[in-house]
Amino acid sequence: MADELKPGDHVEWNTSQGKTTGRVEKKLTHETHVKGHKVAATAEEPEFLVRSDRSGAEAAHKPEALRRI
């Protein structure tokens, strides 16, 4: 599914408070920082920058943690 996700896709993922939803902002393929946290994304192991529907916060997630809805 990882290669199928694209910006604008509506996704859900698990948090300690339960499931939450958001939209994919972009595919990360290089090391970067999000909210002060290092994201070790590579072209071979990308991560996705997602914006939460509820809080508006951005976070990076591995593709296997996301499910398109």
Image (spheres, rainbow, N blue to C red):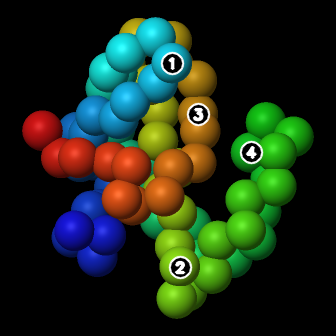
Q: Amino acid at mark 4?
A: Val
Tag 4 near tag 3, CB within 8 Å: yes
Q: Amino acid at mark 2?
A: Glu
Horizontal placement of 22 versus 11: left or right? right
Q: Earlier in the sequence, mark 4 or mark 1?
A: 1
- Give the foreground label among 1 and 2: 1
Residue 34's tag is 4
Q: CA distance from mark 3 to mark 2?
A: 19 Å
Residue closest to the eye, 65 or 51: 65
Q: Secondary structure at mark 2?
A: loop
Label 2 crowd (10 A; few <14 / some 14-19 / many >=20): few
The answer to whether residue 54 shows anywhere in this view is: yes
Q: Earlier in the sequence, mark 1 or mark 2?
A: 1
Q: Position of residue 61 (x, y in %)?
A: 51, 50
Tag 4 near tag 1, CB within 8 Å: no
Horizontal placement of 51 versus 11: left or right? right
Residue 27 vertical placement versus 9 (above, below): below
Residue that badge 1 annotates = 16
Q: Earlier in the sequence, mark 3 or mark 1?
A: 1
Horizontal placement of 50 versus 35: left or right? left
- Which residue is located at x 69 percent, y 76 percent? 30
- Give the foreground label among 4 and 2: 2
Q: Earlier in the sequence, mark 3 or mark 2?
A: 2
Q: Amino acid at mark 3?
A: Glu
Residue that badge 3 annotates = 58
Residue 20 vertical placement versus 65 (above, below): above
Residue that badge 2 annotates = 45
Q: CA distance from mark 4 to mark 3?
A: 8 Å
Q: Amino acid at mark 1?
A: Ser
Q: Earlier in the sequence, mark 4 or mark 2?
A: 4
